[in-house]
Image (cartoon, helix red, strand yellow):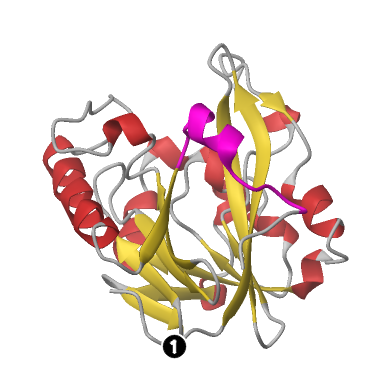
Amino acid sequence: MPTQATSLARLYLMQVASVPPMNIPAVCYLVQTAGGSSILIDTGLPGPELLPDDLTAELSEDVLTQIAKLDLKPEDITTVVCTHFDMDHSGHHDAFPNAQFVVQRSHYDDAQNNPRFEATRAIWNQDPDRFIFVEGDHELVPGFTLVETTGHTVGHQSVLLTLPQTGGVLLTIDAVDSEANFSMDRDVSPMNEDEEAVRASTAKLLDIASQDEVALVIFGHDPQQWESLKKLPDYYA
């Protein structure tokens, strides 16, 4: 599935919080293109005033603070890829005034009346004219492919990148939260809406990861793997 040509230059990984006791990372990603555009993948948890009382997340530097280390302002972000609208992925969508939001049509439609996404609805539910709706797998720009992976939520999407030096990088996001669950006999937690769809999406991602071009698979919330990965200001090129 990776394209032969790529317009991408760098991938930055950002941890915006951790959830005890296992220190599960909450993360988002920034992709810079060779032409100088900046594409954000998710925006992390919101500020503490919106966190529910039963969520004991330890907030670290939010996405705005982290991109500032790269001399980027919110106005510089041209695109926000919305993998899904769970709270730990959509907490700062409203901070990017010039961005268009790329989301699976099925996810956007489901989220309008799904109480699961209510906590950050005022943040992610921007003017519909700012959304780019996709249906299924979709190449956003050369080397940047959205992979529809329904199961964790309706219309969840993962991301497949082709970097000039690293090669293929698969971001499973929440379709596969950890390396331990990257198999067909995986556990499926109650946080996933459709077990059968989760397993189908896992099979799809396993097939993509088996291709020679894919050099790195990054799981959505894997504390052990996260320790071994490059984080901003370091990057994958």
Tell me the residue that label 1 is attached to.
5
Q: Is residue 233 visible?
A: yes
Q: Quadrant of the C terminus?
A: bottom right
Q: Position of residue 75 (x, y in %)?
A: 79, 71
Picture layout, residue 121 above or below residue 212: above
Which residue is depicted at the point 55% across and 85% down?
7
Which residue is depicted at the point 66% across and 40% down?
15
* Secondary structure found at label 1: loop
- 105 sits left or right of 68 in the view: left
- 142 sits left or right of 74 in the view: left
Q: Is residue 120 visible?
A: no
Q: Nearer the viewer, residue 234 or 154?
A: 234
Picture layout, residue 93 above or below residue 152: below
**Mark 1 Cα within 10 Å, few/some/many (few <14, many 20+)?**
few
Q: Nearer the viewer, residue 32 or 127?
A: 32
Q: Is residue 177 magenta?
A: no
**Residue kind at label 1, given as amino acid type:** Ala
Q: Which stretch did the figure color magenta?
A: 220-233
**Residue 151 picture quarter:** top left
Q: Position of residue 102 (x, y in %)?
A: 48, 70
Q: Position of residue 128 (x, y in %)?
A: 51, 71
**Residue 109 picture quarter:** bottom left
Q: Quadrant of the N terminus?
A: bottom left
Picture layout, residue 68 above or below residue 192: below
Q: Position of residue 222 (x, y in %)?
A: 47, 32
Which residue is depicted at the point 28% across and 50% down?
154
Q: Nearer the viewer, residue 72 or 3?
A: 3
